[in-house]
Image (tube, rainbow, N blue to C red):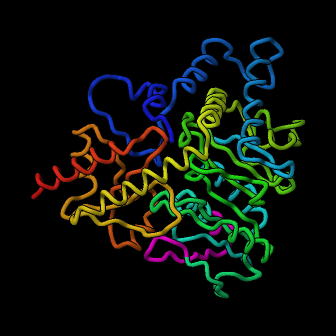
Amino acid sequence: MLDVQSIRKNFPIFNRGKNPFVYLDSASTSQKPQSVIDAVSTYYNSYAANIHRALYTIGEKATDKYEGVRKKVKIFLNVPDTHTVIFTGSTTESLNLIAYAWGQKNLNADSEILLSEMEHHSNIVPWQLVAEKTQSSLQFIPLTDDGTLDLEPNDSLYSKRTKLISVCHQSNVFGTVNPIDSVIATAKEWGAISVIDGAQAVPHMKVDIAKLDCDFYAFSGHKMLGPTGVGVLIGRTDLLEEMDPFMGGGEMIDKVTLEKSTWNKVPWKFEAGTPNIAQVIGLGAALDYIQSVGIDKIHNHDVDLLNYGLDILSQNKDITLFGNTQNRGAVIPFNVKNIHPHDLAKFLDTDGICIRAGHHCAQPIMNHLGVTATARVSFYLYNTKSDIDVLAESIEKTARIFA
């Protein structure tokens, strides 16, 4: 069991006054512990310098700190030597990097890209853009009514034309944890590239890249206690070496003449310009914090909150819960009868409760559900069952007001 009260003491936002503050939107972005805030501010206060280039002391320190986070990521996710860790600005940038740097070079009119109907827009739109440029086609694994994917063998989905399969590890809407080991195995069977969007998974469960053996895996720092502006792409090294650069500029070059240029080694080939140094260092501090708490303890705590939340919310006859899968993360999408999700979110805010309302960057899912939007609560290591009780009471109060 987690000592949540002690954990909350590490997060300044939970210690800012007597006013109630119930944060239930970690699937969008997580709160930050003091150690992460300090890591970022210490960089700016004590050794702010560009990396890889400066030969003076603080520049060397900045480089060591930055590159040290790459090692921390490898340890945290058990990244094998066959794969490389690349720092990006977000999961979105990581997926775009693959779509453009791999997709434009390897896809053509005879190619098919297989996604799922469950995807975040960041794992749909880049492939739509690249499909248009390469004249390749898009196929989608169907979404079922219980919020899972229909992964039954289907000749209309899988074929020798399938060149890439890209799915989320965990849904940002339903919390569904997909059987990505099966998806990756299917990709190998058809000779396709496997891409996994792990933005919702990495903060909440043990992820072992060596065991999964996917080709690409992407996630963000800001959903796992780290700063905004930093993402990670883990890619198979041989594929990255074959790919063209995503952006051109400083750091990603080897030699530049007026006539042509050659490229730096992976991973720096894909880290053009001055990177988000402070944010990467902050991510390193976030990884340290999660390691100190224990990812398995965090996962078990999330599951406990999820089950409690489902039980409490299901007791309200005016609440419609969406999704009904057994294997899910700590995310609950729902609507309240006769109350638009945006209105609900604003009324809950008056009680100091933060939830997400909208289409969650997943409009195809909303279309499947036959709604324009849902409310969504999501839990993390700093939440308690009392947060859920406060939420339930506020929902009932809001329903009485609208009635």
Q: Is residue 76 above or below residue 55?
A: below
Q: Residue at x 61, y 76 (%)?
A: 139
Give x and y (percent) for residue 210: 79, 54
Residue 147 falls inside the magenta stretch:
yes
Q: Residue at x 76, y 42 (%)?
A: 74
Q: Which residues are magenta?
A: 130-149
Q: Is residue 278 left or right of residue 348?
A: right
Q: Is residue 128 above or below residue 202?
A: below
User: Is residue 310 among the parts visible in the rendering?
Assistant: yes
Q: Residue at x 48, y 34 (%)?
A: 3
User: Is residue 261 among the parts visible in the rendering?
Assistant: no
Query: Residue 153 versus residue 381: which sits nearer the camera?
Result: 381
Query: Residue 136 versus residue 151: which sits nearer the camera?
Result: 151
Give x and y (percent) for residue 104: 73, 62
Q: Is residue 26 left or right of residue 207?
A: left
Q: Residue at x 61, y 22 (%)?
A: 39
Query: Residue 10 versus residue 195: which sits nearer the camera?
Result: 10
Q: Is residue 327 above or below residue 73?
A: below
Q: Quadrant of residue 354?
A: top left
Q: Is residue 67 above or below residue 180?
A: above
